[in-house]
Image: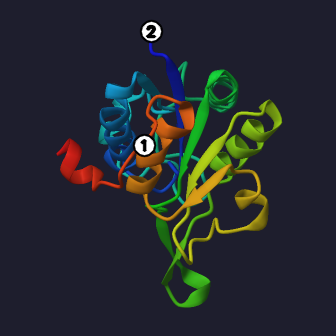
């Protein structure tokens, strides 16, 4: 069993399976040498690889329900994952967009209410949160920022500091994680 658990929170609705899971797999590869295990809300949901966009614009539909992918199961398992984790990584770097027909079809970022809820749970359970919120992101809001221990602009920066924050490393130079984990 890993020394530390990090829950990987971030937008799923409006993303493909590969988009939703890709950055989580990158985080798992980067953190594994530090004995840090990344817990993904996408685990057990490989059947979603063929669905296309997950959740749709309204957050419903797009995929068949299963024992791990229905409203009650998602709510309870995600809450439990946050509660048992040593740290939550909330990544808003790749926030999905949809065309807004009322704005002439211009694309708008979709707010991730699920990830906001996970940050609130983490705060209530006193689990520290490292959030990735690029400038101009729809999630750059005081209630999100103040629910986090650290807010950075890139996933690479967050992955660099998580081992230090958990005490698995003591001095981390900033590195390009894409180059480090290929």
Kindly check if marks 1 and 2 are in contact, taking CB atoms under 8 A apart as contact.
no
Q: Which mark is residue 98?
A: none
Question: Is the residue marked by circle 2 packed among few (<14), some (14-19), or many (20+) residues within 10 Å?
Answer: few
Determine whether, in the image, residue 114 is placed left or right of residue 126: left
Residue matched to label 1:
171
Q: Residue at x 68, y 53 (%)?
A: 113
Q: Residue at x 55, y 32 (%)?
A: 166
Give coordinates of residue 131: x percent, y percent. 58, 53
- Mark 2 element type: loop
Within the image, what quadrant is residue 175 found in? bottom left
Query: How many numbered badges does the structure rendering display?
Result: 2
Q: Is residue 67 above or below residue 111?
A: above
Extreme residue in the front direction: 171
The residue closer to the viewer here, 179 or 117, is 179
Q: Position of residue 126 (x, y in %)?
A: 77, 33
Quadrant in which the C terminus is drawn: top left
Q: Decide if residue 85 is on the left or right side of residue 117.
A: left
Residue at which label 2 appears: 1
Drawn side of residue 123 relative to residue 118, left or right: right
Label 1: state its secondary structure: loop
The answer to whether residue 1 is above or below residue 100 is above
Assess disc 1: are there few (<14), some (14-19) or many (≥20) residues with their C-alpha within 10 Å of its C-alpha. few
Give the mark nearest the N terminus, 1 or 2: 2
> Does residue 151 appear left or right of residue 44 in this picture?
right
Distance from label 1 to label 2 (Cα)?
Answer: 24 Å
Q: Residue furthest bottom?
A: 104
Of all residues, the one furthest to the top in this rendering is 1
Residue 5 location in percent, x, y?
A: 53, 24
Q: Residue at x 50, y 48 (%)?
A: 12
């Amino acid at each position: 069993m890993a020394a530390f658990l990090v829950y990987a929170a971030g937008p799923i609705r409006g993303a493909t399976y590969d988009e939703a899971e890709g950055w989580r797999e990158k985080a798992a590869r980067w953190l594994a040498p530090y004995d840090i295990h990344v817990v993904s809300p996408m685990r057990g949901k490989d059947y979603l690889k063929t669905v296309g966009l997950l959740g749709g614009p309204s957050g419903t539909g797009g995929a068949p329900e299963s024992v791990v992918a229905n409203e009650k199961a998602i709510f309870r398992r995600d809450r439990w994952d946050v509660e048992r984790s040593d740290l939550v990584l909330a990544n808003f770097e790749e926030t999905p967009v949809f065309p807004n027909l009322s704005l002439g079809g211009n694309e708008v970022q979709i707010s991730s209410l699920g990830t906001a809820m996970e940050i609130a749970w983490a705060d209530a359970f006193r689990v520290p949160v490292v959030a990735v919120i690029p400038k101009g992101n729809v999630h750059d809001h005081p209630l999100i920022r103040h629910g986090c221990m650290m807010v950075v602009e890139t996933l690479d920066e967050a992955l660099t500091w998580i081992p230090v924050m958990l005490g698995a490393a003591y001095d981390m130079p900033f590195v390009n994680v894409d180059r480090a984990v290929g």
